[in-house]
Image (spheres, rainbow, N blue to C red):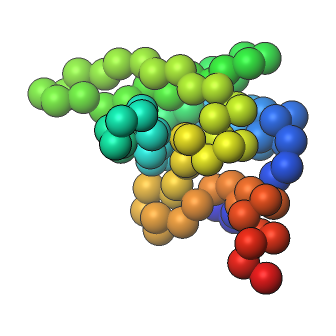
Amino acid sequence: MEELEVNHVDDIHKRLAEMVGQRVRVKANMGRTRVVERQGVIKNVHPAVFIVEVDERRGRKSRQSYQYVDVLTGTVELFDPETGEHLFKLLGNQLEEH
């Protein structure tokens, strides 16, 4: 999966709509130094949120919803589970690198 440069929520929504059914690794900053990492499959995309069915202990599954705006701000990061590469490159971060 190639990294996509994004600077708008619609860009993230379109890309994730194309990725329904694919596995991703999600890293979510839940505040107060609590970071949750999970792997799962993108199940649905909706106007404001997307749903990831994540693998839990003992083979159980649960569904987590995340907002596109959280991906845009970096609160939620999405990675390729095999290579570990970011799926989205935020344009704001790109400016800081140069």
Residue farthest left in this picture: 58
Is 90 positioned to the left or the right of 57 in the image? right
Q: Nearer the viewer, residue 65 or 15?
A: 65
Q: Quadrant of the N terminus?
A: bottom right
Residue 72 vertical position relative to residue 2 in the rendered view, above or below: above
Whole-percent x, y for residue 75 in the image:
56, 41
Q: Position of residue 13 (x, y in %)?
A: 78, 33
Residue at 81% across / 70% down in the picture? 95
- Tell which of 45 and 93 is nearer to you: 93
Residue 46: percent from left, percent from top: 72, 17
Q: Residue at image x 23%, y 22%?
A: 60
Residue 85: quadrant of the picture: bottom right
- Looking at the picture, does residue 91 appear above or below residue 52? below
Which x, y percent locates residue 84?
Answer: 46, 64
Q: Is residue 43 visible?
A: no
Residue at the front extreme of this rendering: 32
In the picture, measured across the screen, residue 91 lies left or right of residue 22, that is: right
In the image as oriented, which residue stretches furthest toward the bottom? 98
- The residue located at (63%, 56%) in the rendering is 87
> Does residue 86 appear in the picture of this structure?
yes
Q: Quadrant of the C terminus?
A: bottom right
Of 85 and 9, the residue lying toward us: 9
Task: Judge from the rendering whether residue 11 lies leftward or rightward of residue 35; answer left or right.
Answer: right
